[in-house]
Amino acid sequence: MNKIVVSGGRQLRGRVRVSGAKNASLAVLCAAMMASGEVVLENVPTISDILVLADILRGLGARVEWLERGLMSITPPTQAGGEGATYPEVKKLRASSLLLGPLLARYGRARVALPGGCNIGIRPMDLHFKGLVGLGADLSLEHGCIGAESSGLKGARIYLDFPSVGATENIMMAACLAKGQTVIENVAKEPELVDLANFLNSMGARVRGAGTDVIKVEGADGLSGGRYSIIPDRIEAGTFMVAAAASRGEVTVENVIPFHLQPVTAKLREAGIGVVEQEDKILVSGSLPYQNIDIKTMPYPGFPTDMQSPMMAMLCTVPGLSLITENIFENRFQVVNELKRMGANIKVEGRVAVIEGVPEIQGAQVRATDLRAGAALIVAGLLANGETEISNAELIYRGYEDLVDKLSGLGASIRGEGGEDTVDADWS
């Protein structure tokens, strides 16, 4: 089992470059299956989630190749082959559900096993199903697989009861090849969704309103191939910002879109941490004393649920009481027990975590319970007294490219054991 070992007490200093966005890349790779020709994607992170999805696409008959680091080529098949997106691979990856819309629209049928991913709470597919059925799909669930068929999707007006990112993306992609206009209301506004819409439009789709409450899609006869560059990962950037603050260091986080990070920036400033925004970089500098704060996770542009765990780790040694209210996923507080093993004083009452700052936390043997919990334990290890050993580190590699090397470059004492910092990819 992979482990990451961190020795605390070192201030992070220097510059670090953020990789392409995990969640944008996963959606764009799925959407590439709708193209009639080759799609070349730039700024694709080499993380295990991407490699799993690439294997799923190959199983569907697509040609997927790494041209060089960060540069991927995808050529969809004329007809989707194989047994669809089957359980052995899909169980590793929640984003595999995003294949439903593209496969249904392009090939008239789709078969996708119920997806897996991190155990952070119930993420129902009902809104996905509601939207696709509204477009004219026939859905079935047999033996743990979702089957979808259609003789031709038609535009419709669809209202989402909750602004689900995945449901918005699936419906938006399917609507690109539906006949007529589709109007999707109460949609998600995340930057990764906007990036997906921009990618679809670069292939000839007609999507308007991404980033607002209403998305309108005029169906097209087909989508062409092309070249597209993925946006930077705002969660990776936010993690480095929080890590810099936790270590009381000074770090310039490069290749970012500062506007995407405003919710994180606002909370760091509220805590007394220096944040200076520039065109495509952010300087974070930390010096005592910090102030206790309250955080409520919300759909974008609210505070991102993916940043809640790293912020909790940083707040463990901030004097006073800090509150974190989790409004998105009910299992996001699994990291609390691991932080308590390090001496943190945290109490959970329903969806609220109360963090009472302690003078210091101690290194310990802890376990990553999910991707962002793993990142939080690294942040905790950076500010802890002594050595922290994080097991189950393969979860961390699902979403962070070269994380150990990047932190080492900033002066952290950190190493991986029992596995590599980077996942295997064939650049030839």
Image (cartoon, grey):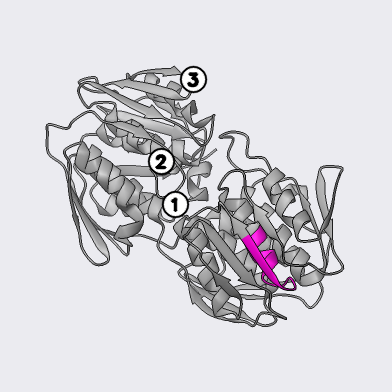
Q: Name which of mark 1 and mark 3 comes first in the sequence.
A: 3
The residue lying toward the viewer, choosing from 130 and 142, is: 130
Query: Is 189 on the left-hand or right-hand side of 61?
Result: left
Q: Amino acid at mark 3?
A: Gly
Q: Which mark is residue 53?
A: none
Q: Which residue is mark 2?
A: 375
Q: Which mark is residue 350?
A: 3
Q: Quadrant of the N terminus?
A: top right
Mark 1–mark 3 CB contact (< 8 Å): no
Mark 1–mark 2 CB contact (< 8 Å): yes
Q: Secondary structure at mark 3?
A: loop
The residue lying toward the viewer, choosing from 58 and 280, is: 280
Highlighted range, magenta:
171-183
How far across and down, in percent of the image, does residue 295 sit? 34, 33
The residue lying toward the viewer, choosing from 69 and 307, is: 307
Q: Residue at x 67, y 65 (%)?
A: 182
Q: Which residue is mark 1?
A: 400
The residue lying furthest to the left in this view is 288
Residue depth check, mark 2 versus mark 3: number of the one nearer the observer: 3
CA neighbours of label 1 inside 10 A, class few (<14), some (14 to 19), many (20+)? many
